Structure formats: C-alpha cells, structure tokens
Amino acid sequence: MVSMPVLVLEDIDKSFGGLKAVSGFNMTIEKGEVVGLIGPNGAGKTTVFNMISGIYRPSSGKITFLGDEITGMAPYLVCQKGIARTFQNIRLFRENTVLDNVMTIFHPRAGYNLLDAVLRTPRFKRHESAITGQAMELLSALGLEDRAYDKAMNLPYGAQRRLEIARALAGRPRLLLLDEPAAGMNPAEVVKMVELIKYVKEKFDLTVLLIEHQMGMVMKLCERLVVLDFGQIIASGLPAEIRSDPLVLEAYLGKGAAV
Amino acid sequence: MQKSKWGSFIIIAAVTLVVYAVVRTLETMGLIDQYWQRVLDQALIMTIGALGLSIIYGFTGQFSLGHAAFYGLGAYSAGLFSKVYNSDHNLLLFMVSLLVGAAVAGLVALVIGLPILRLRSDYLGIATLGFGIIVKVGMDNFNKLIPALGGATGMSGTPQLANFDWLFIVALLVIILVRNFVYSTYGRACTAVREDEIAADVLGINTTNTKVIAFVLGCALAGLAGGMYAHRYPFLHPSSFDFLKSFDFLLVVVLGGLGSITGTVVTAVAWVFLLEVLRFVLGQTFIDFRGVIYALILIIAIIVRPQGIFSGREIGFLVPKPFSTLVGRKDGVNAGTGS
Amino acid sequence: MEYFLDQIINGLQLGLMYALIALGYTMVYGVVKLINFAHGDVFMVGAFVGYFGFTQWGLSVPLAVLTAMAVCSILGVIIEKIAYRPLRYAPKISVLISALGVSLFLEYFCSLKFVFGPNYRVVTRPFQEMHWNIMGVTITNIQVIVFFTVLIMLLLLQFLLYRTKVGTAMRTVSVDHDAARLMGVNVDNTISLTFAIGSAFAAAGGVLYAIAYPQIHPFMGIMPGLKAFTAAVLGGIGIIPGAVLGAIIMGQVETLTSAFLSSQLRDAIAFLILILVLLIRPTGILGRNEPDKV
C-alpha cells in the first residue's frame, strides 16, 4: 500500500507585481521526513512557507496536504487542517504570558462557547482545566514550565524560540514548518536546538520542513535538502550530495559552518 | 482549590456590598446630594460604555472612534421603546428596553463590523469616525421617519426608571461579564489578534470572527450604557452622541491602560468625578476651558505613558485562579490575560 | 443645463480648496505615515489669520495668504516637534491619539474668549464680488482667484519636489527613513519642513475658503479636514497628484449632492465615499498595492 505524501507543491509560481519571487517550484514531502529548504537570503524560502500557510496565494500551481487541496486557503483553516509554523522574526504574543501564548492556540478546539465562558458553566471549567493541563505539558516538554507566568517578551532569546515551537505544537499539527529556528544562536545552542527538534518530532509524530542557514543544524537534522536560488530549485537530494554540488556552492551556501 | 475558588468570589461580594452600603449611607445622611448622585450615576454609565470600548480596543486592538454612535443608537432605541410601550413604568419592560438598546447597537455593529474590521488600525479609526458622523446626521434627521425620535431638537418622554440601584447592579454584572469573557479562550483569542494578527491567523485563530465578536459585544455594551442613559436623563439630544463623546470613551480606555478591566473601571469613575470636581472648583472658567483641558490631558498622557496607567495590570481578585497545580506561580500583578 | 455647469464650477472651486488641504495630509502621511487629525484645524487657523488680515490689518489677498502661510507653517512645525516627534517610533496608534488631542486642543483653545471666541465671524472681503456671464455660465472673481492661487501653488510644489534638493530629500524620507539617513539626509529637518509646507498649503486653503464662504468659527476645520483626508485617500494616500484628483472628485460630489439631492446629506455622502474607498480600494485611485512583509 502506497502511503499518501504529506505535502505536495506542484508547479508553484509567485509574483509580486513584476517581480517573480518563486517559479516552477515542485516538492513532495512524505510522512515522517525532515526536509531542509536552503538557499541564499532572498531566495524565496519564506515566500514558499507563506504560500503553504495561506498568507500568500500562489500565482499559479497547486498545494495539496494529506490529499486535500489547500491552495489559497485561509491561514487559520490551513492550520486547523494540521500545518503549524514558526516565524523567522519571532512573532510571539508579546504582552501575554508564556502559558497564554500556548493556551490561545487551543481556541478552535476549546470545547465551550461564549455563553459557557460568560456564565462560567461546569463545561467551561472542565475544558479550561483540560486546556491548561495540556498547555502546561507542552511547556514542560520544551523546558518552559518554570516561566509559565512570565510575559513572553521578557523571555531570553532561546526560550522565545522554544516558545514559538511550543505554540506551534499546541495546534496538534501533522506538519511543522520551522523558519530559521536557530537564527542567532551560538554552536552550543544550535546543538541543543537540534536535539529539541529531534525529540519533538519523535514525541509528536511529526513531519518537518525546515528553513535554516546554520549548516551544522541542516546537516545533522535533515534527511533531504531542497536548494532554492532566485526563486527556483537548483538542486535537491541527500545532504552529502548537496554539499559538493557545484551549482549550490556557486549560489553561496550561506554560513557554511563546520559540520 | 475549593478555598481559592470561593476566595475571590467572597472578596468581590464583600467589596461590592461595602461600596454599595457606603454610597447608600452617605446618601441618607445627606452628604451626597442630588447633583453628586447624578454624577455617580453618570460614572456608572460611563463605566459600562468604556468597558465596551475596552473589549474592542484595549483587548482586541481595534481602534474604534465611533463608540458614541452605538451609545446613541442604544439610547434612542431603548428610550423610544419605553416611551412608546412603557408608560406605566413597568420594571420588566424596562429591562426589555435595555435589551432592545443593546441588541440594536449590537446588530448595527455586526452589519458594519463585517466589512470594516478588515481595515488596519489607522484606517479603521477613520472609518468608524466617518460612521459616527453618518449616525449623527441620521440622528439629526430621524424624526423625518419616526417623529417620536425628535431629530435635531432632541427626544423626551422616556420614563426615568434608572436609579442608582439599577445602575450599580448592571455595572457590576457588566464587570463580571467582561471579566469572564476576557479570562477565557475568547479573551485569549482577542489579545492574540491585538498582539499579532498574522501570527494568530496562521496558528488557527479565525481572526475575523474574533474581531467581530469583540466589536459586537463592545458595541452592545455601549448600547446598554446608552439605554441606561436614556432612562436617567429626561432629554436626549444628538449632540450628546457626537465625536466628542467617542473621544471621551477613548480617553478613559487609553488613560486607564489597555488590557486592564481595573484600569478602565477606575479611570471611568475617576474621570467623571475629576471633571465634576474641576467644574465645581473652577466654575465658569472650567466650562470654557474644558475642551482644552481634555485635549492637554490626552496629549500629555499619550506622550508620557502611552500604555496607560494600569496597562495590562489587573486587581488580584478579578483574576481567576488557575485550575491545575502549577509550578512557579507568580503572585499579584498579572500580565495580559491570566489563566 | 446652465445651472448644472454652474454647479460644476462651484464644485471645482470647492475641490481646489480641498486640494490644498489634501496635499498637506498626503505629504505628511508620505513622510511619517501619520494621519494628521490636526491638519483641518491648521486650516482653520489660516482662515482666521486671513480674517484678521482683511478686517484689522487691511491686507490684500496675496499678502493675507502669505501671512497665513507663514503663521501656520510655524504652527505646523511646533506641533510636530512637541506632539508627534516624541512618538515617532512608538506604536502608530499613540501618535494618532496625540494628533486627535492636538486637533481638539486647537479647536477649544481657539474657542476661548481671549483667543478667537466660539462665535461665528463674518469675513469682509477686501474686494467686491463680481460675476460674469460667459456662454450662459456664471463665473465669479472668487472662483478665478481660487483657481489661479491653487494653480500657482501646485506649480511651486511640483518645482520644489522635483527640482530642488529639499524636495528630493522629502521624497526619499517618504520611502525609508534609514535609507535617507544613510544618504546624508537630515530626516528630522526634512520632516519639519514637510509639516511646514503642508501647513502652509492648508493655511492658503483656509484664506481662500474664508473668502469664498465668509463665515468662520473655531470648529470650521473639522468637516473640510475630514473631507480633504477622504480626498487624499481616494486619490491614493501619499501620492501628490492623487490628492488633487481626489479633492476635485470630492468637491464635485459634495456640490452636486447639495444642489440636486439635499444639503443635509452632503456630509453623510462624503463619509460614505470614504468608507467605500477604504473597503474596496484602500490604496486609492492612483495607488499601488503593497503587500505586508511577513
């Protein structure tokens, strides 16, 4: 029995006005894979993420998730279907507590309605308790339970990145899009982040698509790489192959840290 | 856990009874005369309306400059209802009229909100401002459709059924309602939209729904406040519901602090009293300088402390205790919304 | 038919005056992305200066316009420095609220008895109103004055923006502050200058308005201000020709509504247009679509 691929992007193009950001993009991700999307700055990687998330509608092409077409679907519906993501420039709910940041994501599945909330019915209390418990578990898994009541904006950088991931996981996704989760981290922190992502992938049975410039992370984590330059795929394959691909080296691999 | 659940309830009940008792006593002792009683009532009406704007702007980040339009719609609807159907001063019908006021405001908010809440903050401000002006023009001319509404010369004839007791109870209920809304998944969705609408959207929150719910609820509260106003002031005039009144509500919410129920309530009451005290002390000069004072206070406040006095802070007993055992609980000041 | 053409010309007169105000809104929005609520009140101050110019100092029209422009440009610079600059990099709402505060302050301050007082004042024009009948259409000398004044000012603005260094600086700052700084532009001064020019234009509009509709009062700036803002958005906020285009359209719509429908509906229709534009095409007629960066 052939299993359905998790994500398929077919002939995706995206133009902004006269500028072609992405063209002829094709990608298939199977269940359980960890795929890396790499390339120089401005290559169009985040644009691809934004199209998957539903923030941008592709100019042409088709995106399919677990067999359903999601091209141009509203972002919140895309998420509810099972795709969650983190952002390149952290986008936490800054004034809210760490716990609230995670609990918020349970909203579509909260289990009670407005009347329940206002009247504080038993159903409200039951579900709110459950949400609090599940959110705390997630925080625990990411080492954030001690800071549950801190304001998100007061967290140190590494903790903020972890909170972004905790928040994404609250949506019970099947596919996790990580946009430069290790940006700005030193080698020791990168190692920890690699471990964290591996752990989270196993624990929550995820498929992961990763944008990253830190080559250390990319090589250790990704089973397969797709290389983007000027909006087009110039290479794709195993990390070892990509490392020595002349086209890729020419396009400037980015940080090129020791592996 | 039982203890902490009842703890905050007891404190709220105690504070409420004390406040009520104090006011009543002062009244019977003659220390609060008719004039100041009216001021107190105005403070309660202001609180209800301001809490509405607090939900819309303070918690959901939607910059509405047309709040007074909904206040006015509520006042006229509730007032007209009572004027026409409640000449025997029936209390049940009075309650119905308040619901009518809130419902009319809420419905109009729904119709208007669906299209305009898509706009980003500065444009939303202008659109709601424009809407407010359109409504005011409407109020000046309603009497062409329904003569009883009075038009530019105003409407009278609403039975004056709202007294301190009613206002106090309604204000209290509204505070509890708003607090329960804020400290729930709905409140969290609202603050998420305020903090980062795109992130909220991408992470599964139906931001349009969230904004519309907040807007309708907030405007319905404005309508409720308007309904109370109509039953406490015998004469309704369109000029009471113009842009300046929207500005009044905005001032209270901004000064009081975004994301704080306590801030809104305290500032609403304090603001009404402050203005009356100034009027008392400065007399005629105050009336002349009133607009200038308002404006200066707003400018200074926004430059010196843009986040407001109580920004994000809530009085302890309003914040619900968490439901499960948690590690590292921080006491006292709660940031954003609690859980 | 003649009546219709007369109304078109009246609409043009009104529209050109709105254009002067709208240009101020659009220029300021261009450089600091702020909707300057106080702009309509600067217009009002200009009208009052013109009034004093005519009734107390015996100034001719050009001198009155220049005086008003001078006074208001200083006023604009002061407002920017005190109420907007401290909030320049704060959340947009804060500076918007500050602008609201300034607007109210100007209105109420000018209503104070020792300033202008709250009452309407009638403006005595320094010339006799004349009208001519050309091919059945009535044209007044006021319309001529408005037309030529606005034309001259537009040409001067065009020259300033595209042929001078300061104009280039203004255009650069409206694209990106940091980039402008890196190119050696003094961003603060450029912004101050933009406010000065925008306010001067509003002032000129104020004097012309006082001549055309000779009743002034401290709250006279609210409606024209909002309508001029609508015009700027309609044409494309931040785009100079857009402001003029939008203003001319607004002038026509208002005058024709007033003449053929009802003058009561005048204001409501103006805001209806605003809301529709914001909903359907917020970038305006001449605007381009700029997607948010995520």
Image: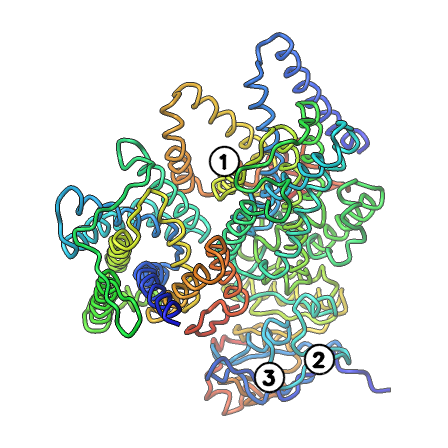
Query: Is A151 above or below relative to A221?
Result: above
Please give the name of the residue rendered at 23% of the width and 68% of the height, measured from the top-left corner: C151
A69 or B126: nearer the viewer: B126
Q: Which residue is outermost to the top?
A: B29
The N terminus of chain C sits in image quarter = bottom left
Query: Is B43 above or below relative to B25?
Result: below
The disc labelled 3 sits on which kind of residue?
Val
Disc number placed over residue B183 in the picture, else none: none
The disc labelled 2 sits on which kind of residue?
Leu
Q: Which residue is mark 3?
A: A226
For marks 3 and 2, the one nearer the N-term is 2
Instruction: Tell me if C214 is positioned left or right of A14 in this view.
Output: left
**Secondary structure found at label 2:** strand
Cβ–Cβ under 8 Å for marks 3 and 2: no
Q: Which residue is mark 2?
A: A7
Q: Which residue is mark 1?
A: B309
- Chain letter of mark 2 equals A
Disc 3 crowd rating (10 Å Cα; few below 14, some 14-19, many 20+) is many
Disc 2 crowd rating (10 Å Cα; few below 14, some 14-19, many 20+) is many
Cβ–Cβ under 8 Å for marks 1 and 2: no
Residue B148: where, in percent of width, then height? 64, 40
Q: CA distance from mark 3 to mark 2?
A: 14 Å
Disc 1 crowd rating (10 Å Cα; few below 14, some 14-19, many 20+) is some
- Chain letter of mark 3 equals A
The disc labelled 1 sits on which kind of residue?
Ile
Instruction: Tell me if B84 is positioned left or right of C130 in this view.
Output: right
